Amino acid sequence: MNELTYEFSLVKKEFRYEFLSVSPLKEVQKVVLMTQTQYSSIYNLALWDTLENGTLSDMSVTDNDDLKTVLATVIKIINSFLNENPNSFDIFKGSDARRHRLCRIIISRELVEIEKSFKVLAIKNNEIISFSSENEMDFYLIGKHENKKKITEYPTSGEQIVRKKLEEANDALSKTDLSKLGLKSN
């Protein structure tokens, strides 16, 4: 085709945060990925180690004796992300049973402090419920407490208007039978 074209850009549906886990023995590049799910306001949160060959692993064991610092950094990243995306939620679970249990223990131990800034929910048997330290959950959800002003009602930038339109489109799509298109949710 020899027609003129417009400039275009790729819109990523992923936010990548990086930091170094440092000990006297080694430094490990950590990556926190927030990847948009099929629902525009829900992002999957994943914590990764960057291996020596450059690949990411959520199963490696860093052994840098800095778990509290790593987790505090992840919470700070969640806070930063949700400040930028106040009508969003992060969904997460541990990459294995041990890590998943660790998530529950940490949330339980820090719940009073966490709930000062965040709303903490869980998914169990395909239902969204309040977080409970006594129960095993399938996933955890964390979001900001409800804002007095809804971002979609008071857009202050083009980005917010685009986000509103995207949310409306996703809402319409979620209520539509798309099987004729042969599409699968991302």
Image (spheres, rainbow, N blue to C red):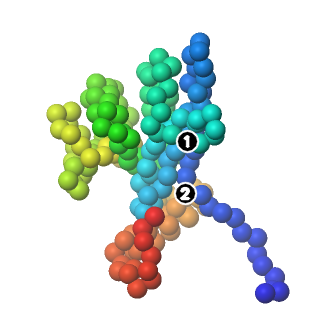
Neighbour tally class for label 2: few under 14, some 14-19, many 20 plus, Cα within 10 Å = few
Coordinates of residue 82 in the picture (x, y in percent)? 47, 43
Coordinates of residue 150 in the picture (x, y in percent)? 42, 54
Q: Is residue 147 left or right of residue 1?
A: left
Q: Is residue 22 left or right of residue 122?
A: right
Coordinates of residue 180 in the picture (x, y in percent)? 40, 85
**Residue lying farthest to the front in this orientation:** 53
The residue at the point 55 percent across, 63 percent down is 161
Query: What is the three-letter code of the residue carrying label 2?
Result: Lys
Disc nearer the start of the sequence (1/2): 2
The quarter of the picture where residue 52 lies is: top right
Query: For the residue labelled by badge 2, is the local secondary structure a helix, a strand or a loop?
Result: loop
Neighbour tally class for label 1: few under 14, some 14-19, many 20 plus, Cα within 10 Å = some
Viewer-nearest of labels 1 and 2?
A: 1
Question: What is the C-alpha distance between the residues marked 1 and 2?
Answer: 18 Å
In the rendered view, tell whether residue 156 sits above or below residue 92.
Answer: below
Please tell me the numbered disc located at residue 56.
1
Q: Is residue 7 left or right of residue 155?
A: right
Coordinates of residue 54 in the picture (x, y in percent)? 63, 40
Is residue 172 shown to the viewer in this render? Answer: yes
Please tell me the numbered disc located at residue 13.
2
